[in-house]
Image (tube, rainbow, N blue to C red):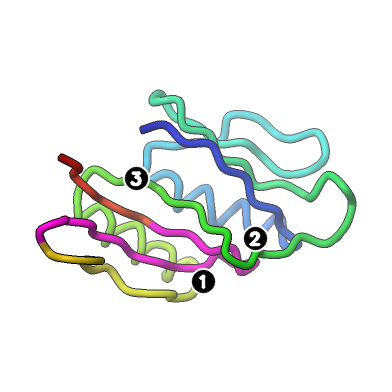
Amino acid sequence: MTMYACVGSNRLDEALAFYTELLALRGMKKMFDNSGGGSFFGNAAGDLFAVVTPFDGEPASAGNGTMTGFPMDSRDAVDALYAKALALGGTDEGPPGLRGPEEVGAYFAYFRDLDGNKLCAFHWVLG
């Protein structure tokens, strides 16, 4: 599953440091700088994630009900991304664990970045 997501930041230098370390756990690295401020990260799978200054010049804000999910290869990888986010200053929004009936196998962890953007790491084998 490839992904593309973008978050705005009011703490761009800190946010870029946060995401540089966090996204490395998904094999993502900085691809290029955004001309308006910030950077785009990517990996060989085609995933793209941007941390930017909002284009409209207004302060960045976390969207109510908005969340970006990072698909992970295993439950251990979910645990590692969640732990890394908290170690980097992110805040807990729900520790790693099964969501829904156990037979569904949906394993998610929720956290917020330094600007309050809600993120999750998940491992879910559909089928």
Q: Estimate the x, y position of residue 67 in percent, counting from the top left.
A: 52, 58
For residue 97, above or below residue 57: below
Name which residue lies at 50% across and 52% down.
68
Mark 1 or 2, nearer chain start = 2
Marks 3 and 1: in contact by CB < 8 Å?
A: no
Q: Secondary structure at mark 1?
A: loop
Q: Which residue is mark 2?
A: 14
Provide the residue span drawn in magenta. Answer: 103-120
Tell me the distance, in whole angstroms, between the alpha carbons under discs 1 and 2. 10 Å
Q: Is residue 54 left or right of residue 6?
A: right
What's under tag 2, amino acid-wise? Glu
Q: CA distance from mark 3 to mark 2?
A: 24 Å
Q: Residue at x 53, y 64 (%)?
A: 118
**Percent x, y of residue 110:** 40, 66
Residue at mark 3: 71
Q: Secondary structure at mark 2?
A: helix
Q: Write down the quadrant of residue 85 in the picture.
A: bottom left
Crowding near the residue tagged with mark 3, few <14, some 14–19, many ≥20 C-alpha atoms within 10 Å: some
The mark found on residue 89 in the picture is: 1
Does the residue at mark 1 contact the one at mark 2 (Cβ under 8 Å)?
A: yes
Depth order, front residue of 33/67 = 67
Looking at the rendered structure, which numbered label has been put on residue 37? none
| Type of amino acid at the residue the image marks with label 3 | Pro
| Residue found 62% across the figure and 36% down from its top | 40
Q: Residues within 10 Å of mark 1 (few under 14, many from 20)?
A: few
Q: Earlier in the sequence, mark 1 or mark 3?
A: 3
Of badges 1 and 3, nearer the viewer stands: 3
Residue 17 drawn at (x, y percent) = 58, 54
Q: Is residue 119 magenta?
A: yes
